[in-house]
Amino acid sequence: MALKGTLKDFGIAEILQLIGQQAKSGVLHLEARDDLIHIAIADGNVVRAESAGRKTRERLGNLLVRAAIITEEELAYALDAQKRSLRRLGDILVELELVTKQDLREMTALQTTETVFRLFHWKSGTYEFEPGDVEWEPDTVTPLRAESVLMEGFRQVDEWPLVRRKITSTAMTFERLRTPEAGRKGDAPRGPGEDVEAAFDGLGEDGLGGVGGGAPDFDAGEAGGRSRQRAQAPKAPPPGELASLGKNERRCFELVEPGRTVEKLVDLSRLGEFETCKALLNLVNLGYLKAVPPANRAAAAVGAYAQDWQARIRRGAARVVATLAIAAALAGIGYWVDRRGVLYGGGAGGTALRDNAAQRFLARYQVERLRAALEVYRHERGEYPDALPRLVEAGLVSGRDLSYPWTEPYYYRRRPEGRFVLLPPLE
């Protein structure tokens, strides 16, 4: 089976559904303008997802550091060992006993699912399925059924807008208002033998609007419709049911500390961005947490932006004042030349001649003065004037400025594209 085309014609949901139903093995390559993702599929199950454009913070080693499983020094030591042995980083970390196999399995699955779920937000791109055998490590990788990934992707797409209404920024922090009651036995963390796919199938038990274990055969459109029906804002339960918080909410509540941002909570919870934000939304709606917007950071950014523009305005005003001062001084000289002329010869029999070179010299500064007046007019009126006399009407220049130091007025024309032409007269 060879699949190749664009996501506009054949979406990611249809591709995963077809591969899963036929239990195919191979690598699905998906490419958008700024990203390239490879999904390894074995017998219809997703076993690995890699992003060629993956940022440094999204790599497995950095995920482990951000989740406080290992330190940066331990990661550096393991990376150095990897360069010498050319082995997988996960195998080295397990061998050095820096992480357990369960931790590695959990973080590898998280890295894979976060990469795959990002595809559900792609609006365009190309895909190509390359059939063939796929190598993967059963000891550290949990295979995810294509149907489960598909239904979870639909759920996230449908419910993200509801979550973002209150969890508006990754810089947001939270304040504890009250502590949940003791949980039920079902709220205990999963044991080492339970995988991520079981978590998918059990999402409905946690009151998070998740999908339960679905049958293998279903239509992608119907799955999206069922998911949209479940995408409702959480409601506060009756007082006697407060103990029924899901494990995701309890885990996030325990991690909340003053000043700890959503971004940091996502890293520490190991639940992924969507599940963490949704658990925080539930805790806010149930009155356990109070969302604190990053007001100080926003105010600082606005203040810095305002200060930058104030500095620019001051610098611009200083340049305009200096230019006008020079133009005024030269205008005085020009006025004297205009009245007296330049005398050649001597005594009363001398002949008074106009020196056009001096006029051209003064006209250069007069043109700059008129240009400055035109810019002021545009800032006040929104466009340049259709004629120079409009500057006189606006009180920006005098009538004599329109021709000084010539007898004829300056040539001016406003161009259709929003600019203008200003030239000295021909004399």
Image (cartoon, rainbow, N blue to C red):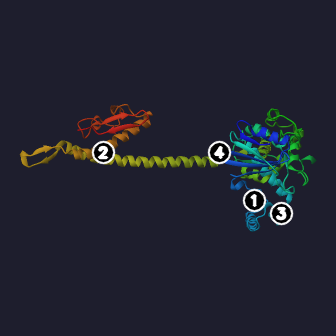
The residue that disc 2 covers is 364
- Name which residue lies at 92% across and 46% down: 186
The tag on residue 84 is none
Disc 4 to disc 2: CB gap under 8 Å: no
Mark pair 3, 4: CA separation: 36 Å
Disc 3 residue type? Val
Q: Which comes sooner in the sequence, label 1 or label 2?
A: 1
**Which residue is more in the foreground, 170 or 106?**
106
Label 4 or label 1, whichever lies nearer to me, is 4
Please rate how many residues cluster around mark 1, counting C-alpha atoms within 10 Å: few if below 14, some from 14 to 19, many from 20.
Answer: many
Which residue does the image show at 81% across and 46% down from the upper left?
178
Q: Quadrant of residue 18?
A: top right
- Tell me, for residue 94, which label it has, or none: 3
SS at badge 1? helix
Q: Circle 4 — which element? A: loop
The spot of residue 169 in percent (x, y) is 69, 45
Mark 4 or 2: in front is: 4
Identity, as a three-letter code, of the amino acid under mark 2: Arg
